[in-house]
Amino acid sequence: MIHLKRLKGFTIWLLLGLMTSWIISCNSGSVSRETKQASSETAAIEFWTMQLQPQFTDYFQSLIANFESQNPGVKINWVDVPWTAMENKILTAVSAKTPPDVVNLNPDFASQLAGRNAWLGLDAKVENQVRSLYLPNIWKASTLNGKSFGIPWYLTTRLTIYNTDLLKQSGITKPPTTYADLAKAAKTIKDKTGKYAFFVTFVPQDSAEVLESFVQMGVTLVDSSGKAAFNSKEGKAAFQYWVDLYQQGLLPKEVLTEGHSHAINLYQAGETALLASGPEFLKTIAKNAPTIAKVSAIAPQITGETGKKNVAVMNLVIPRNSKNPDLALKFALFVTNNQNQLAFAKQANVLPSTIKALSDTYFQNPPTNATTLDQGRIISANQLKQAEVLSPSLKDFNVLQKAIYQNLQAAMLGQKTVDQALEDAAKAWNQRRR
């Protein structure tokens, strides 16, 4: 299964779909002349994915066979890499200048290597006609300093999965929609049931959900020059929000030591009322905790005063040292074209990154007797209207997350005041930037 969080630790298992062949003629007609010429050459393309075998072996074999039949002399070598090994493996390959030709990553991790000039620049390679097929905000997610380095593939937005029984026992008639509502619900649920409303991790290098909550609360993380901007009135309020929840005993103590997977475990055990996650986890819950699944419902993502919703993106990047960069680009555009995006999304219960695929009735109209999964799909698609990648594209984003999380933890434990934690976090980031 694939995780659609960050490569640093986040989260989410996602998948792929079947494709047809006619759209490639449209896309290939729009890419550069060099790409067309490369497609006629005899060449091998190495394509890396993350932990998709054996469940999706048939899909990829069909995908590859179709592309190869349209491009005689081309051989696609598919290499499936375990999720936990991908980061080290691609770092090693890029450093040794022996990378694959097409790699499935996400913008957060890929931007770190984009800062080292590891990926093929796409601005001169992909024409506006092709770029306009993708959701503009999603294409922007794979840019650094205004330069494109990746092609969007598939998306998810967080939803709120909630235990209707626990909410009913607490006298809560509807799930919270804002962080202010969430704080009130957390106290009510704890008072009425002795259980927690939710779990969110403050472990650096894991989920960025807390950092994204800052943006949803109106915090600007960094300014245009790259310096800390979160040491502001809004930033202090966001720090105080999480410190108060923890010190009031409304968050499990393990939020300081456990990652996002613990949130799923607690929800499946009936120990939390809410789970912020993608709709793909509904299948996991149904398999692992059928009793909890029966009383689970789904609602839009919790947000702040801004109304912003998060979107998680997976993309395809082409290493600058690829032996066949133009042919690699053609294959990447084939994998992500409209037709294949739609087929992929239907199979994987994810969202496509192309405008035409997202406009399909599958994402707009729920079927008769819609399941919770169907409802989640429609809600997720609708959220894309307000969704954006909330984490800034920074080559050293992990440093920013670590600086904030470590100092926030210190404030939660009473080792620092909120003011001191905020100042120290900003100082740690700004010193790193020098």
Image: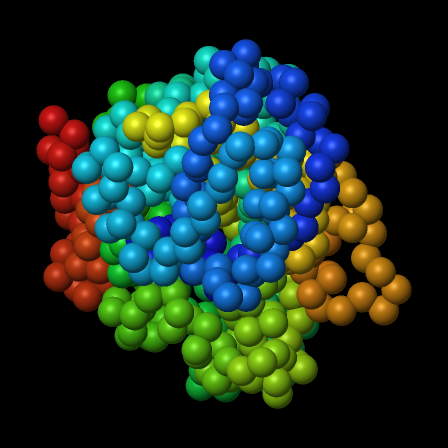
Left or right of 368 on screen, residue 385: left
Examine the rendered structure and indicate whether residue 429 appears above or below residue 78: above
Q: Is residue 308 visible?
A: no
Q: Residue at x 27, y 21 (%)?
A: 225
Q: Quadrant of the C terminus?
A: top left
**Figure disc tally:** 0
Left or right of 236 on screen, residue 166: right
Examine the rendered structure and indicate whether residue 57 appears above or below residue 119: below
Q: Is residue 369 visible?
A: yes
Q: Which residue is situated farthest in the right direction here? A: 368
Q: Nearer the viewer, residue 42 or 339?
A: 42
Left or right of 93 on screen, residue 21: right
Residue 186 image offset from top left, x and y in percent: 47, 71
Residue 415 image offset from top left, x and y in percent: 13, 61
Residue 352 image offset from top left, x and y in percent: 63, 43
Q: Residue at x 43, y 60 (%)?
A: 51
Instruction: State the image quarter where residue 198 is shown.
Output: bottom left
Q: Residue at x 29, y 74 (%)?
A: 254
Examine the rendered structure and indicate whether residue 157 appears above or below residue 189: above
Q: Residue at x 22, y 60 (%)?
A: 409
Instruction: State the image quarter where residue 68 is shown.
Output: top right
